[in-house]
Amino acid sequence: MKHEMLKFFIFATVILIAPVFLKGGYLMNVLIFVGIYTILAVALNLLLGLAGQISLGQAAFFGLGAYISGVLTATHAVNPWFSMVIAIVTVGMIAFIVGFPILKLKGHYLAMATLGMGIIVYIIFNETVDLTGGPSGLPGIPHLSFGGIIFDSDLKSYYLIWFFTIVVILLSVNLAASRIGRALRAIHDSEVAARTVGVNARLLKVQIFTISGMFSALAGSLYAHTVTFISPTSFGFNVSIELLTMVIIGGLGSIYGSFLGAAILTLLPEFFRTFQDYDIIVYGITLIVITMYMPGGLVRGVPLLVMSFFRGRPTSAPSEKSG
Amino acid sequence: MLKIERVTKIFGGLKALDDVSFSISAGEITGIIGPNGAGKTTLFNIITGIYGPSSGRIFYEGKDITGFPPEKLARLSMVRTFQGIELFGQMTVLENVMVGLHTKSRSGIIASALKLPGHLREERRIRERAGSLLEFTGIKDLAHTEAANLPFGKGRLLEIARAMAIEPHIILMDEPAAGLNSRETSDLAELIKKINNLGITVALVEHDMELVMEICSRIIVFNLGNKLAEGTPREIQEDEKVITAYLGED
């Protein structure tokens, strides 16, 4: 427990002082998106890494959060903070209602159903032109402001976004270590055994799906108010797949792993501009290589690799598995 | 305590259980025996809500529990263990038992995420209680081992510790001695007696006759989806129907 708090403290400190060294460059702008995608990856990880329930439709919650916030503020001039709350609560309710029937499904069927959900929502963004602006997007979303500070520069947005990202990480780390987190991991390993000792698996899965949706909606709302323009392509199927890639690369069930996955997948395309058109191929290859050679993700795989390098032994040290 | 009334279960035209009735009295150790395919595990699955019966009713502590899901039965203090054990493999031994204490704690998602003081106190209490349950089953030294790495016999003890965590009135064990060596089996016999001495009713499906005859106060024999006989170990050993149909010529 002490160990967890220390890890969190170090992480938060690094985030806090990073802008001092970046001096507001282009990287600063990219790190804002790392923050947003970290929230999204953590949200998916709660569902996939903890509870073992897949979702290929996370972009739907992300998009709904962004559009609810965007439409309320840009079209109806509602206070941005208030519209953020409305976005989170509404998406939470949608996730809760959708969750009951959808989470009865398991494995591939759940993947297909959530995929369908993502596609339906994406089509709605495109087709309800009067409301969302359709494919040409929704401009004119105001920045968030607080006590006279308008979060319009990269530096200010950085602190705004990362404030929320750190809160989401802290809440998620706590949840994962709690009674609820244990029950979710139990469902992951053996749903029938978990139910036998009194875990209401069905309700708990819907609850974590709801939390995951609400965090994603928060990310969506932050995205809308930071970029000030949204269009459906930011919330398509490929985004759901990117989020899945982030979670798996970082490490299933590891909250900080999700940050690592989000950082790598957001930063890499910036460094390898030449790949731009082929980025989906790069994602695909990365995913295959990681799942084949580091099934625990980078968070667990890299330390093992480093250890085996220094010991001069092959990666599969025999000590680990025999009990 | 537990009353099975005219239960029939049909799987795609095949009668796994055919109009079965019997009861299990409080405080006893009841053994359910019979050759493979006699319907013993089906019976356990129906009692513990894994699936419902095709017809018939099940009463527990005077209450009709037919079709109750397992999580509801756990809250009514009924628990089971599985043939071939079902553990939470990626969690430690201690955490497995802490999940067993799920119904004995109540911090919700919000209290857990915010680490409210009540939640922390509860965590400490659960951890201590789980530790003492591991002591009870004799695997305290393995508390921080990942459950997937346990040898089979220890895994069985963990499953029992986890089941005990719900503070059961009745515990149903599906072939607890399967896969255990003779030393582990005799330790298991002692543990089951110790559990029974706490006033907990025990029902077990088992193939190990020696174990059944030693610890059970009452035995029910199944064959081909029907109840064949019922009685004390001595009565069963002398029952001609049982001898011919199940135990063989000997």
Image (spheres, coloured by chain):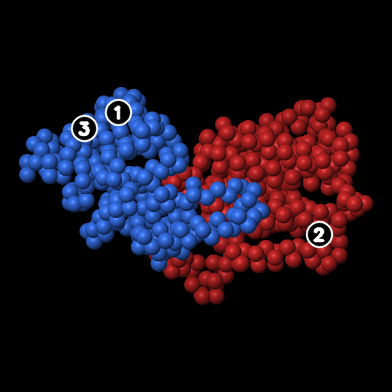
Chain colours: A red, B blue
SS under mark 2: helix
| Residue A184, image x, y percentages | 54, 48
| Measured Cα–Cα span from mark 2 to mark 1 | 71 Å
- Residue type at the position of mark 2: Leu
SS under mark 3: strand
Chain for numbered disc 1: B
Chain for numbered disc 3: B
In which quarter of the view is residue B68 placed? top left
Quadrant of the rendering where the C terminus of chain A is positioned = bottom left
| Residue B227, image x, y percentages | 21, 32
- Residue type at the position of mark 1: Glu
Q: Which mark is residue B5?
A: 1
Q: Residue at x 49, y 49 (%)?
A: B104
Q: Are marks 2 and 1 in contact (CB under 8 Å)?
A: no
Q: Mark 3 points at which residue?
A: B227
| Measured Cα–Cα span from mark 3 to mark 2 | 75 Å
- Please, which residue is most extreme toward the bottom here? A311
Q: Name the residue under label 2.
A: A27
Q: Which residue is drawn at 27% across and 38% down?
A: B24
Could you tell which of marks 3 and 1 lies nearer the N-terminus? 1
SS under mark 1: strand
Q: Is residue B49 left or right of residue A117?
A: left
| Residue B76, image x, y percentages | 42, 40
Q: Is residue B116 visible to the viewer in this orientation of the structure? A: yes
Do badges 2 and 1 share one subunit? no
